Image: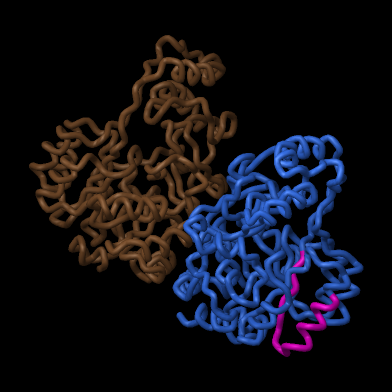
Chain colours: A brown, B blue
Amino acid sequence: MTIQELFGIGLPIIQAPMAGVQTSALAIAVSNAGGLGSLPCAMLTPEVLRAELEAITAQTRQPYNVNFFCHTPPEPDPQRESQWRAALAPYYAEFGIDPASVPAGGGRSPFSAELADLLQAYRPPVVSFHFGLPPPELLQRVKSWGAKVLSSATTVAEARWLEANGADAVIAQGLEAGGHRGIFLGDDLTTQIGTMALLPQVVRAVRIPVIAAGGIADAQGVKAALALGAAGVQVGTSYLLCPEATTTALHRAALQSGRAEHTALTNLITGRPARGILNRLMKELGPLSAAPPAFPLATAALAPLKAAAEQLGRDDFSTLWSGQNASGCREVPAAELTRVLAAF
Amino acid sequence: MTIQELFGIGLPIIQAPMAGVQTSALAIAVSNAGGLGSLPCAMLTPEVLRAELEAITAQTRQPYNVNFFCHTPPEPDPQRESQWRAALAPYYAEFGIDPASVPAGGGRSPFSAELADLLQAYRPPVVSFHFGLPPPELLQRVKSWGAKVLSSATTVAEARWLEANGADAVIAQGLEAGGHRGIFLGDDLTTQIGTMALLPQVVRAVRIPVIAAGGIADAQGVKAALALGAAGVQVGTSYLLCPEATTTALHRAALQSGRAEHTALTNLITGRPARGILNRLMKELGPLSAAPPAFPLATAALAPLKAAAEQLGRDDFSTLWSGQNASGCREVPAAELTRVLAAF
């Protein structure tokens, strides 16, 4: 079954939900163009989420996707927090920031009963999760209004787990993909494999449709993924220069520079491994490090550093998520990019 | 230009040269089936190389490839050698091996004038290199008899370098590939990217034909690589169970087990990063470690451990090279596998 059949859309393209660099505008544009637009919800307050759902339902009648993280929030650990502050201390000094003024904490909440209540009024046709699936009772609520449920698998074992636990389709997230790795069974990064290897093995392992993600940047990439048995593709990075994205000027500049050829997985930004263009922090402390606290608690301590550097026009601490193939980024409307991706 | 046109062969398939698990028999079978068979030469003495070339030229009239490493041999470093011995000391004790009886050294020699002399008598139609290219005068000698020259690129920058320095085609070696990474400009493993990302970027960056390698295990994989602009593909892992391969029984068993789903890059076997199924050594000391000396000097100290464990039927220290997609391995003659790969 293709994702066009599964979701009732015209093109085999899902715009990847990308928290921090997009709002409903990008999702609306993609859905209206025949793809599946996605709204990343992990960093939204309930009030903003409601406003975004109002915007989407007012501006498109096409199917759309809302995306949530479903991690278990960690117990704050004072020792790890102070270790993280110690690692950042030279930067606080350099930018004249009083460490005592910096709050602890993270900015990403998992899916919850409260959010399910909120969603139910809108009955979004597709709900995708990252880091596994929510608890069965919450998943059941989402399914109760007919939503199709997706989640990312980074290994064959994760794909089998998602199928067994109620996903309607699985996103095979190859190692090339930008942003957070969806890994949720274990944390050994040597298990993470490239799209060319992961996709066909997942296709063989499960019966539900498999969506390819990671390194797909243009129509040839879409054609290749379909040749490998994908039911559709999820594309993120290529959308980052679209006018509908809220990608910062610094992030756009990095994507358009030679720096975009070199990304790495880093846990310095949130505490979980995610792929982005190398910034100063990643070069000096990592990119992978034992210093940050558990996801998502690394975020707060970085925020004032990020803000201070950005005020100077520097992306030393900025989040520059990107996949390994930024060659498909174009400064064109998202509708046009969606059609170009599907013109294979 | 396709590799069929470039080499004068019938199918777009190169059998990857795999030192240690094959001899001329595999190359002959693949060349006679219409692919390009490859002979790995890095671990052969001149005498054995000559005998293998005699065997090939006696048994096929089709084009074939000979493959050499072209690293600069390191100066032996007593301090690093003793550090390596210290890391292995508990294993020597466990297996009752006297460390004083274990010689130092490696088992892989780079391409040389002596080898060029030897080759010239046979004029092999294709010569491929790993870790860059040999010095210009040696490269010129190879080209003087009309050989097409290939080498592996693991980044866009390496592909551009190979084109500028005389390669006739470049192998885009995605991170999924088994065996040694071809990386030769720098040693930062975060620069290594998946086939789905590397291949289209290399295709865009160079004018010479690009051969895809890494994660390609079946006809769908070949079709996907061609969709991404490849002129042909190089497949290694899928050939490892063919009767013509000399893959050990332990290696075959690992490839056919669930363990094959988990490979990692390790520098413990030779000193350079190479991908294989996790063995005990990789789990306990790495898979990446500061302990081993420079390539290829890690090899000798491991040899008696490998032999002792294998006598007990254990692959604790064995070389179990594999790519991230072993799903294409079949116990069928190499000719049949070659035709299956090309039947897309």
Whether residue A64 sits left or right of residue B152 in the image: it is: left
Q: Position of residue B252 (x, y in %)?
A: 58, 65
Q: Is residue A235 magenta?
A: no
Q: Quadrant of residue B37?
A: bottom right
Q: Is residue B60 magenta?
A: yes
Answer above or below: position of B312 versus B244. Answer: above
Answer above or below: position of B83 versus B326. Answer: above
Task: Count numbered badges in the picture.
Answer: 0
Answer above or below: position of A92 versus B286. Answer: above
A67, B308: nearer the viewer: B308
B65, B5: nearer the viewer: B65
Question: Which part of the image, by quadrant, shows the C terminus of chain A?
Answer: bottom left
Whether residue B2 sits left or right of residue A146 in the image: it is: right
**Residue B177 at least partly seen:** yes
Q: Which span of residues is magenta-colored?
A: B50-68
Q: Position of residue A115 (x, y in %)?
A: 17, 35
